[in-house]
Amino acid sequence: MRFAAEVSRIPACRRWAVNLARAEGASEHALRLVALLTTEAVTNAVRHGPPGGEVRLDLRRDGDAVRVMVRDASPSLPVVQRVPPTAQGGRGVMLIDTLAEAWGVERGPDGTKSVWFLVPLAADAARPDA
């Protein structure tokens, strides 16, 4: 999915990712994780990418998980921040780092970067490692 880097597009991206994860058989908890983490990754791409840019969102099955990838044209790498409870933002990468099975960043040859994360299809809220 390609879209203009606009905040108004974030809900549609979240719905798109959740629908694809559902089609892959994701549990209800996995769907909630996909929704939250996709929202955070797309929001970061929109906010920190170049104004007027484009963002790409991809979701595919990766074994027993779904892999969500968000690409933008900013060369800046995401940083896990520890913010005070009163901060109004800055928790997106921390949430991805904490809740995803794995995550990382890939740099494209054209100066783009892709932030990706994995959510197990059978993620269960009762399991501390899911």
Image: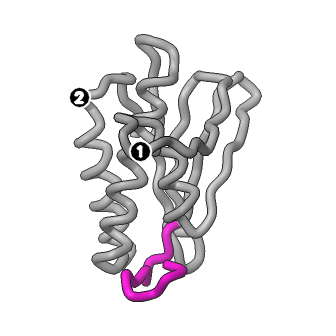
Q: Which mark is residue 53?
A: none
Camera-side mark, 2 or 1? 1
Query: Looking at the rendering, which quadrant does residue 24 occupy?
Result: bottom left
Identify residue type, mark 2.
Answer: Ser
Using the image as rendered, state which of residue 108 and residue 91 is in the foreground: 91
Which residue shows up at 63% across the image and 39% down it?
79
**At which x and y percent is residue 47?**
43, 24
Identify residue type, mark 1.
Answer: Glu
**At which x and y percent is residue 13?**
31, 43
Q: Residues within 10 Å of mark 2 (few under 14, many from 20)?
A: few
Which residue shows up at 41% across the image and 12% down it?
52
Residue 65 in the magenta stretch? The answer is: no
Which residue is tagged 2? Answer: 8
Which residue is tagged 1? Answer: 40
Query: Looking at the rendering, which quadrant does residue 77 occupy?
Result: top right
- Lower sequence index among marks 2 and 1: 2
Which residue shows up at 56% across the image and 45% down it?
82
Which residue shows up at 50% across the image and 23% down it?
48
Residue interval drawn in magenta: 119-130
In 3D space, how far apart are the residues under numbered discs 2 and 1 (Cα atoms)? 14 Å
Query: Looking at the rendering, which quadrant does residue 89 occupy?
Result: top left
**At which x and y percent is residue 115?**
59, 44
**At which x and y percent is residue 105?**
68, 44
